[in-house]
């Protein structure tokens, strides 16, 4: 749907719910980022939690965001994240954590450094998309190289998002 100015809006039917896979750098810039995805689901790869752990100590803004995000996730979870996810809030999607998996054979030849965090995050998105071809999986990252890799394997889609009255083109 587009508004009168031609901007794509988020008035999506329920059947078009998406799943956003978040990269660490998105969280480090906005600890409340999981609240910006309306009714859509969010996946946090376990690798992202491991990377956030490295940023918890310190007095910089990214350290604050790492701590706040982990606290918010912990308060949402109540032990549910690894078993179907946890509701983010009313009229919002669910957030879940996905454990690391062996690098998918399609990615292995192109990304041989399987232990690299970016490749682990990309692998989670790729495996989810392959398992549910009807689903819409989008990797959200501020890392240009990872964004290009995601586009190459069909995970990234740029879109305008309307949040309240303010239009954001973050993801």
Image (cartoon, rainbow, N blue to C red):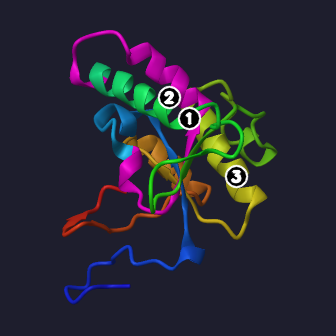
Q: How many marks?
A: 3
Residue drawn where x is 62% and y is 55% of the image: 153
- Whether 10 is drawn above or below 91: the answer is below
Spatial CA distance of label 2 from label 1 is 5 Å
- Whether 83 is drawn above or below 160: the answer is above
- Whether 2 is drawn above or below 43: the answer is below
**Mark number for residue 128?**
3
Spatial CA distance of label 3 from label 2 is 23 Å
Q: In which quarter of the image is the N terminus?
A: bottom left
Identify residue for label 1. Answer: 77
Along the line of sight, the residue nearer the viewer: 82 or 98 = 82
Decide if residue 126 is on the left or right side of residue 166. Answer: right
Q: Give the range drawn in magenta.
A: 34-62
**Judging from the image, what secondary structure is the residue with disc 1 in?**
helix
Identify residue for label 2. Answer: 74
Magenta-drawn stretch contains 47: yes
Along the line of sight, the residue nearer the viewer: 107 or 165 = 165
Residue drawn where x is 45% and y is 52% of the image: 89
């Amino acid at each position: 749907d587009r508004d009168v100015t031609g901007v794509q809006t988020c008035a999506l039917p329920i059947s078009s719910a998406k799943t956003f896979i978040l990269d660490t750098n998105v969280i480090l810039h906005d600890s409340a980022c999981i609240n910006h995805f309306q009714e859509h689901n969010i996946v946090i790869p376990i690798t992202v939690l491991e990377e956030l752990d490295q940023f918890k100590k310190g007095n910089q803004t990214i350290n604050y965001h790492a701590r706040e995000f982990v606290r918010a996730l912990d308060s949402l979870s109540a032990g549910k994240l690894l078993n179907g996810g946890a509701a983010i809030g009313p009229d919002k999607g669910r957030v879940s954590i996905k454990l690391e998996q062996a690098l998918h054979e399609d990615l292995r030849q192109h990304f041989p450094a399987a232990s690299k965090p970016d490749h682990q995050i990309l692998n989670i998105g790729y495996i989810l998309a392959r398992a549910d071809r009807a689903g819409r999986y989008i990797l959200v990252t501020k890392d240009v190289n990872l964004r290009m890799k995601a586009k190459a394997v069909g995970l990234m889609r740029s879109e305008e998002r309307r949040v309240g009255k303010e239009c954001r083109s973050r993801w």
